Image: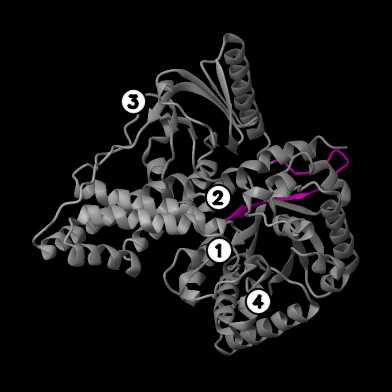
Amino acid sequence: MEQFEGKSIFRKIAMGKILFYEKASAVVKREKISDPAAELARLDAAKEKAVHQLQQLYEKAVKEVGEAGAAIFEVHQMMLDDDDYCESIRNMVEQDGVNVEYAVAVTGDNFSQMFASMDDDYMKARAADIKDISERLVRILTGNDSDMSALEEPVILVADDLAPSETVQMDKSKLLGFVTEHGSSNSHTAILARTMNIPALIGVPIQKDWNGKMGIVDGYRGVFIVDPDEEQIAKAKAQMEEEARKAELLKTLKGQKTATKSGREIHLYANIGSVSDTAGALANDAEGIGLFRSEFLYLESDHYPTEEEQFQAYKVVAQNMAGKKVIIRTLDIGADKKVDYFELEPEENPALGYRAIRICLTREEVFRTQLRALLRASAFGNISIMFPMIISVKEVRRIKEILAEVKAELKALDIPYQDVEIGVMIETPAAVIIGEELAKEVDFFSIGTNDLTQYTLAIDRQNPKLDEFYDAHHPAVLRLIQMTIDAGHKGGAWVGICGELGADMELTEQFVKMGIDELSVSPTFILPLREIIRNMD
């Protein structure tokens, strides 16, 4: 028996046979060529085939993990046409007279290293994407692009690292869990694992001779056990049976009120990042959508989404939720969420920089386009609008002026809309301190605990070196949450939480006692939270 510690990506137990996954090695030799045009024609044909493969992966991923999780494969298609990347390959072929697969391999390594050396953790994680598309092209060019999805039996996959495309291609019904030595919790592979509910660990020193042995992935403790003894197997089986029992038991809570024994009701809403995610929200009996991250419409596009494109997305969500509340957050990009066509300049402190509502209030036409789409969609359901990164009453009043102007435009054109509730995200200590004044301007608050914790503790939450110092349960954070609830209620606004702390079951009872009105969480947390709240006095 051997036991190894790693970083947990998804808290769940998996037990089964270990499959050591080793990428098919395509040895790329440097060869001199006499016909650069023929080599570049091979490149164009390989890119065309790669785009076709990525489109198939996208369609498969949409069905399994939703549009937000599948978006990476659209990004990979765009990367294949990146000017700098393609120019580097072409220059090597034309000027150095080398074979195209060698040019792709070298360019992929160079670009991957360039991204990996950047200070921004989000950009570092993109190194894996460059590596993925380069390896795909090399496999196609060398005739080594066989299907990697065939798993003959349920296994725990062990690998040096996994690309997003490899994770999605594998048969989910036979993928019990995965363990990798490299990778980051911000990588698209990690995001896909969480979306697919697959227990996973990263940072484990893997060994090839584990292949075929029994393994246990303990996502609760962040431990991988190889060749477990009988006692450990029995314990893992008991935990898995308990997980299954709880899952079945939770199904009985569907359709039940989320209320304490004394009758106090809490609204349990879902966080979503795409139109297709509404299916998961409804399947888990969400009472509404507490956070629709509209920035995914921008992140997944290579152009500013038009009013019509946005209207159709918002309208479908509103209709799918059939009268249940749908709170849509306006554009929240900047910091770790980059969109090339916005042409945002690099910043030394992007988390404290030009982002979210600051972009909207200085690029008003982008903002007005989104507001028009939101108001038009409000005629088809129960939509509310929420504004991120607010720090002043002045900002809120300007937002309300713009909103009133947009309403007047629609009214003049005889385009129907509803009077929507508006709210602000409380993400900074500044917003907490002026909470009572803000509450008089809006209908509700939604506490973004991820950023509130970051700004309160002066800790960059994207920096893994600071993990040991990051304490979401810090008394100062909890005190600010209490202050927000009190200020909101005093000023006439209801108050919810849409950050990760909303799903922290160690704090659920405390939040209810604080007076929270709503919790908005990932859909899979809704029924477990309902159980906790219904058992409270």
- Dot 3 or dot 2: first in sequence order is 3
Q: CA distance from mark 4 to mark 3?
A: 52 Å
Helix or strand or loop: what does disc 2 sit on? loop
Q: Which mark is residue 358?
A: 4
Q: Name the residue that disc number 2 marks.
A: 186
Count residues near mark 4 (Cα–Cα under 10 Å), then give few for <14, some for 14-19, many for 20+.
some
Q: Is residue 47 magenta?
A: no
Query: How far across and down, in percent of the image, does residue 343 sit?
Result: 49, 76
Q: Is residue 210 visible?
A: yes
Residue at the spot x=20%, y=67% of the render? 95
Q: Tag 4 or tag 2, which sits nearer the N-term?
A: 2
Query: Vertical placement of 174 versus 32: above or below?
Result: above
The CA distance from mark 1 to mark 3 is 38 Å
Q: Secondary structure at mark 3?
A: loop
Q: Position of residue 36 (x, y in %)?
A: 13, 64
Give whichever of discs 1 and 4 has the lower sequence position.
1
